[in-house]
Amino acid sequence: MSEMNLDMIEAMKGLDDKARTIKELRDKVKAIEQTKKDASAELDLKEDEFIKILQESNNDNFSSSVGKLYLSNRTSYKVPADPEAKMMFFDFLKKEGIYDEVISVNSAKLNSLAKEYHEVAAKNNDPFFRVPGLGEPTIMTTLNFRKT
C-alpha cells in the first residue's frame, strides 16, 4: 500500500471517536441553548414584574444594591402592511422630497424618520399627524441596568 493509503486508514480509524465527540458537543450546545432559552423566559417574567411595580408606583427608576434600574420607552413603527399603505407612504416621501434617500428604508431608518416627523408635529401642537401609510407605533417599555 502506498503511504497515502496508510495515512488515510489511520485517519479513518479515528473517525468514530471524532463522531462521538461531535455528537457530545452537539448535545452540549443543545443543552446550553435550552438553558439559555429557559433563563431568558424567566428573565422576561422578572423584568415584566419589575416594570409593572415601577409603573404602578409611578416610578421610572430604582437604585438597588447592585445597580440602578430604569425604564425607557422605545417607539417602533411597522413598515406599510399592504400595497395601498405602501403607496401612501411612498407618495408622502416624494412630497417631502426624500423618496430617493429612503426608498430602501430599513426598520431603523423608518423608525428614525417617523419619530422625527412626529416630534416636529408635537412641537407644532398637531396631535393628529400621522405619517401616511404607517400605522400606529408600538411602544415597548424596557428595563435597563447599569452596574454600580
Image: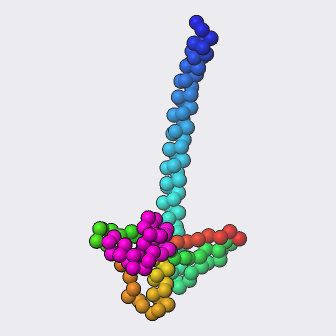
The residue positioned farthest toward the bottom in the image shown: 125
Residue 34 is inside the magenta segment: no
Q: Give the residue displayed 47% in from the left and 70% down from the top.
A: 101
The residue positioned farthest toward the right in the image shown: 148
Q: Give the residue displayed 48% in from the left and 75% down from the top.
A: 113
Which corner quadrant holds the N terminus?
top right
Considering the whole magenta stretch, tell me its main secondary structure.
Answer: helix
Q: Give the residue displayed 57% in from the left and 17% down from the top.
A: 8
The residue positioned farthest toward the left in the image shown: 84
Q: Is residue 137 left or right of residue 46?
A: left
Q: Is residue 93 left or right of residue 70?
A: left
Position of residue 100 measured from the top left corner of the image (x, y, whole percent) = 44, 69
Between 28 and 94, which is closer to the camera in this rendering? 94
Which corner quadrant holds the C terminus?
bottom right
Question: Against 82, is 26 above or below?
Answer: above
The residue positioned farthest toward the top in the image shown: 1
Q: Is residue 120 left or right of residue 128?
A: right
> Which stretch appears magenta?
86-113
The reply to whether residue 81 is visible in this rendering is: yes
Q: Give the residue displayed 50% in from the left and 44% down from the top.
A: 30
Position of residue 71 measured from the top left corner of the image (x, y, whole percent) = 55, 76
Between 15 and 63, which is closer to the camera in this rendering? 15
Question: Against 86, is 20 above or below?
Answer: above
Residue 104 is inside the magenta segment: yes
The reply to whether residue 136 is visible in this rendering is: no
Image color mode? rainbow
Question: Against 131, is 11 above or below?
Answer: above
Position of residue 13 measured from the top left corner of the image (x, y, whole percent) = 57, 18
Number of numbered callouts drawn: 0
Position of residue 77 measured from the top left corner of the image (x, y, whole percent) = 42, 73
Asked which quadrant contains residue 129, the reply is bottom left
